Amino acid sequence: MALIRAQANLAERRLRSPSRVANVARNTGAERGRHDRWKIARDSFWGFAGPYLREGDRVAILGAGNGDDLPLERIAALAGEVTLIDLDLKAPRAARRRLSWRLRRRVAVIGHEATGGAADTIAVAAALGEVPGRISAPEAPLPGGPYDLAVGDLLYSQLLYPALLDLGVEERRREAFLERYCPILTRGIVARLHASAPTVVHIHDPLAWWEGHEQTADLDQILRLAEGDDIGVALGAVARGLGPVESDPRAALRSFGIEPRATALWRWPFSPGVDYLACATLTGERVPT
């Protein structure tokens, strides 16, 4: 009986706040050893974005989660203030606790659903077999601003997919909803980041590799092209792969007429046997130091 009640409560919470419930479940389920394994991602992030960070900057990181992919200690040591923004308050608070007391004082945590409830509306409609009404995502600045630098951290493909998956939406319907609504949500997130800071870094995961997952692109080849300073050719190889194109922030940037200043690609060793490609895009007028 207790198990039945627990399952009913979980189902109710999923329908009431599907995005947050899915987000919390994934943060809570992070396996042991992940922080160490993701060191390569933290180092790659810092090598790319670190030269654009200035001493005393106010920095916002949207989608901070557990912070395992973020060089948070290095960011906080240079910045004046860092604000971690996420649906799940518990995860970024845990990331902050890993810092020294001196750096912890510079880091704030804000719980915030950046789509303004649009993702939940879409997910619930999909689960109930309905069509959502007119969907619009907010484009206002993020809370706590203004900022000098804002980061969208690997949240784009997670705006809708986890909630649809956990709600048990059938695959064909799920794919149709992702194709129709993810561009709207992604565009809203991109707009909010650019309304919040003059320099913005977008990090997304365009491709993935694991046994049994169909993929037409080769990760090692893409990384070799990127390391050879032929980023345009590398991005062309990425475009020929199979991934969540509907949640690509670079497409939203093009729709806004925003030109990338710098781009980098790196391996994200998500879990044993699973690799993602991380794509970082920086916009703004700052030059690296």
Image (tube, grey):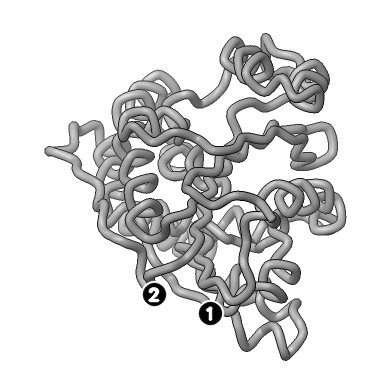
Residue 108's tag is 1
Indicate the quadrant containing the C terminus: top left, top right, bottom left or bottom right.
bottom right
Looking at the picture, how far across and down is residue 97, in whole percent? 70, 81
Residue 99 left/right relative to 165: right
Q: Residue at x 32, y 29 (%)?
A: 255
The label number, if any, that marks residue 144 in the structure image: 2
Q: Amino acid at mark 1?
A: Ala
Residue 46 seen in the figure: yes
Q: Between residues 23 and 35, which one lies in front from this camera angle?
A: 35
On residue 173, the disc is none
53, above or below 256, in the image: below
Name the quadrant containing residue 261: top right
Q: Is residue 1 visible?
A: no
Q: Residue at x 45, y 36 (%)?
A: 249
Work out how far the residue at label 2 is from the one at label 1, CA to CA, in angstroms: 9 Å
- Amino acid on which disc 2 is placed: Gly
Classify mark 1: residues with Cα within 10 Å, few (<14), some (14-19) or many (20+): some
Mark positioned earlier in the residue sequence (2 or 1):
1
Q: Secondary structure at mark 2?
A: loop
Secondary structure beneath label 1: strand
Residue depicted at 61% across the width and 13% down the height: 236
Q: Are marks 2 and 1 in contact (CB under 8 Å)?
A: yes
Point out residue 147 in the picture as x, y percentages from the top left corner: 44, 67
